[in-house]
Amino acid sequence: MSGLSRSVENRELMAGEGPLQLLRRDHAPYILGTLAEHLGGVERTRLAADLYDLVDADLEELRLHEVDLPRSAQHYCATWVEQGFLTRRAARAERTEEFSLTEHAHAALRILDQVHRPREAVTRSRLALLTDRLRTLAQDTDPDSTRRIAELEAERSRISALIDMIREHGAEPMPADQALEAAEELFSLALDVPSDFTRVRGALEDLHRQLRLGLVEHDGPQGEILDQLFLGVDAIEGSEAGRSFSAFHAMLIDPVQEARFHEAVDALASRPFAAALGTERVLYLQSYLSRLQRDSHQVRHAMIDLSRSLREFVRSRQFEEFRALADRLRRPQRLGLEIAPHVRPHTRLEVELTLSTFTPRSVGQFRLLSPGEATADDPLKTTEAGTLDLDALRATIRESEIDLAELETAVDAVLATQPTATIGEVLTAFPATQGLASVVGLVVLAQRHEQPGREDVAEELVRWETQHGVRSARLPMLTFTSPPRESFHV
């Protein structure tokens, strides 16, 4: 590769979306420091409310050190999702959202860790680890049975000689400095594994989107993916990423492997060099497998949910609706390509489109109305008060309310000529000037005095005149036997 090619690759790497782009973001030291503390350690995923509380507390401390971060944690988390630091997904157990670091954020943190704690020298344990892996890979991929048997017999002879030497002279442990180097190499290797879950989950989600897109954009009656799904084949779990993760998950939950891992870690914790390795690292290794199992279960559940979502997308025939919609969108595009050589883009067409009366706008365009900011353009004028017309006031009140004063006067006039009177008798002597409102007013007056009706007649028929003719209604027998109580007269 020439220097020019390498330079172009470096330019694309630094300009593209990746860990180097995140390291160049504004406030990147504070963002990565905060997220590494809350999402880069034991907890790899947090609910939105929990992360907001933790980030708000950190922002308060940063502001005390004159760091310009004036907004809330909720706003910054949304911004960090857009910038590529965080991934936001729907929580599986609760009806809320959860946050986790992206693959590029994990890579950026590893770069910072390497800068903070650079390797001072080439370690013997790293070369030994590389050599052992190369020898194991060469043996496992050797198709020659004779050569493999010879290598295994030589290994058996070496192990037998080592056993005899230990029986004769005793076991001689590895020097403390070499043991510490090997433990640090293993710890560095262990730190890289949890961040791989983010990459695997992102790869599965990308595969899910590609499969959906393939189902929608396939022009034929049925495609290979659709045939497999109808036959019950899990396209996501059967992919390269799905098979690799399933094998890792099966090994991770194997009880034999789990027991061997814990036995080895407990044995290393009792060795003298463990004190130089550090209590924090030892505790991390002791709880390492349980953390991996928890993260692995989350990815496993996500893979199951994606597979179930894809099968439901096919079973419910939703892909046919999306395919029809995609065809409608592609049809005007194809037509535009056909007429492009003949019609210019700015050609005016004699077609009028009736737009919707509703114009969608962003919420950010709305402004609160402050009455204090509005001022009257016309000057205020003083108007002289007029004379109050009592007759006009009475007429206005009479149009909106029942004229009880008129009804009380009518009842008093009827009772002056006879000891008792019914509502019908009152209406016969004094017609209802307000129509139905007068009848209702007489009922209210009669019920207000609680006068019982006649025992021989339960109802009476009353009539009144309106603009549209004579109206009638049957009412309970209500009688007036004494003048009604005085009421307010206008």
Image (spheres, rainbow, N blue to C red):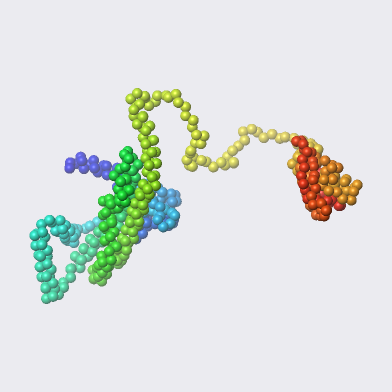
Q: Quadrant of residue 434?
A: top right
Residue 33 drawn at (x, y percent):
35, 54
| Residue drawn where x is 31% and y is 42% of the image | 222
| Residue drawn where x is 30% and y is 51% of the image | 233
Residue 223 drawn at (x, y percent):
30, 43
Mark yes or no: residue 155 visible: yes
Please state which of residues 140 and 84 is positioned toward the viewer in this rendering.
Answer: 140
| Residue drawn where x is 45% and y is 26% of the image | 351
Vertical position of residue 342 compared to residue 246: above or below = above
Viewport quadrant of the N terminus? top left
| Residue drawn where x is 22% and y is 57% of the image | 119
Residue farthest along the bottom direction in this orientation = 168
Please state which of residues 484 and 450 is positioned toward the viewer in this rendering.
Answer: 450
Mark yes or no: residue 70 visible: no
Residue farthest along the front direction in this orientation = 456
Please state which of residues 427 and 143 is positioned toward the viewer in this rendering.
Answer: 427
Q: Is residue 230 left or right of residue 434?
A: left
Residue farthest along the right direction in this orientation = 417
